[in-house]
Image (cartoon, rainbow, N blue to C red):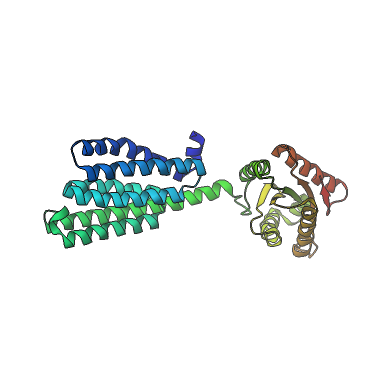
Amino acid sequence: MLKRLKDDFYLAMLTLVGVTIVLCVTPYGIYRLYSGNYIVGIADLIMVGCAIAATVTAWRTGDTVKPGLFMAVVFCVGAILVCISLGVDGVFWVYPFLVFVFFLVSPLRAFALLLLMLLALFAISSFKPDLIFSSQFQMLAFFVTTSITSLFAFIFAYRAQIQRRELQRLATTDSLTGASNRRTLNEQLVLAIEQQSRHNRQYGLILLDLDHFKQINDKYGHKTGDKILIELVPVLQSLLRQHDPVFRFGGEEFVVVVADISAAALEKLAEKLRQGVEQKMLLPDGSHITTSVGIAMLQAGEDWEAWLHRADMALYQAKHQGRNQVVVG
C-alpha cells in the first residue's frame, strides 16, 4: 500500500484529498442535516460519498485520471450549491476546493474547471445580486482573490508537473542513449511474467551485444564508441514495432522485450535487427558494425531472472560461435 502511494503521485494525491474530504466535510454535513439545512447537508455528504467512491475506484483499477476528474467536477458543482445555499458563508469553502482540484487533475483541466465554476458563480451573482454576496465590492473582492489564487496554483502545479516528468525520465532512461534503463527493464520483465500468467500472452526477449566494441573504443576513442551507442537505439527502434521497448542492459548490450509473438517470429525479428545493424551502422573507416544476438521465449512458470539468463547464455553462445549471428536460448 505504502509502495503504491510512493510510486504513484496522482494516486497519493487523490487519496489525500479523499481522506481530507471525509474527515473535514462529514462533520459539517451531519451538522447541516441536524440543524435543518438539508440542501447543504446532502450536498456535503454527496461530495463525501463521491470522494470515497473515486478513491476506491482508483485503488482498484489503477486509473487515477477518470476518478480524479469525476471528483473535481463534483467538488466544483458542490461549491456552487454551497455558495447558493449559505451565501457568503459558503464562499470560504471555495478556497480549499481551488487547491484540491489542482491535486486531482492536470493543471490545464483544473484551471478550466475552476474558470467555469467562477463564471457560474459570477453569472448567478449578476442575476441575483443578494443571493451570495451582500455588496458589489464583496463580490469583486471574491473574484479577484479566487482568480489570483487559481493563477498561482496553476503556475505551481504546472511547474511541479514538469519537474515530476523530468524526474521520471531521469529515473527510467539511460542518460547516454535515451533507451530505457535497467531498472525499467526489470519492471517490464515482471509485468511480462504477470501478463503471461493472467492472460496467456506470449513474450520474447532479444539480447544484443555489439561485436568487438572494446576494440572500437581502443582504436577510435570512447567518444566514437558513445556516438555508436547513441546511433544504435534509433536504428533498432526503426526496425521494431512502436510499442516494443528498447532497454540498455549495460555497456554495449541492449534488450528488446517483444509482446504477442511466436518463437518463429521472434527469431525472424532478431535476424532482422542483426541485419539492420550491419547494414545501417558503419565505423569511421567505412567498415560495418556487427552484433551478436541471443533470444528466448518466456516459458510457463518461469521467473524473469531465468528467462533473462537463457537469453544471456544464447548471446554468449553466439559470441563463442563467431559473432554476428542469432542464437535461440
Name the residue nearer the viewer: 2 or 288: 2
The image position of residue 177, as x and y in percent, is 64, 54
Asked whether, in this view, residue 252 is left or right of residue 55, the answer is: right
Q: Which residue lies furthest to the left in this view?
A: 135
Count how many numbered circles sit on residues in the image.
0
Instruction: Tell me what residue is drawn at x 49 percent, y 34 percent.
Output: 1
Asked whether, in this view, residue 70 is left or right of residue 256, the answer is: left
Classify the position of the C terminus by image quarter: top right
Against 70, residue 123 (above or below) is below
The image position of residue 99, as x and y in percent, is 32, 48
Q: Could you say which quadrant of the image residue 271 lies in?
A: bottom right
Instruction: Tell me what residue is drawn at x 61 percent, y 45 percent.
Output: 184
The image position of residue 248, as x and y in percent, is 67, 49
Name the residue nearer the viewer: 83 or 146: 83
Query: In the rendered image, is residue 247 in sight?
Result: yes
The image position of residue 144, as x and y in percent, is 22, 57
Query: In the rendered image, is residue 186 in sight?
Result: no
Q: Which residue lies furthest to the right in this view?
A: 321
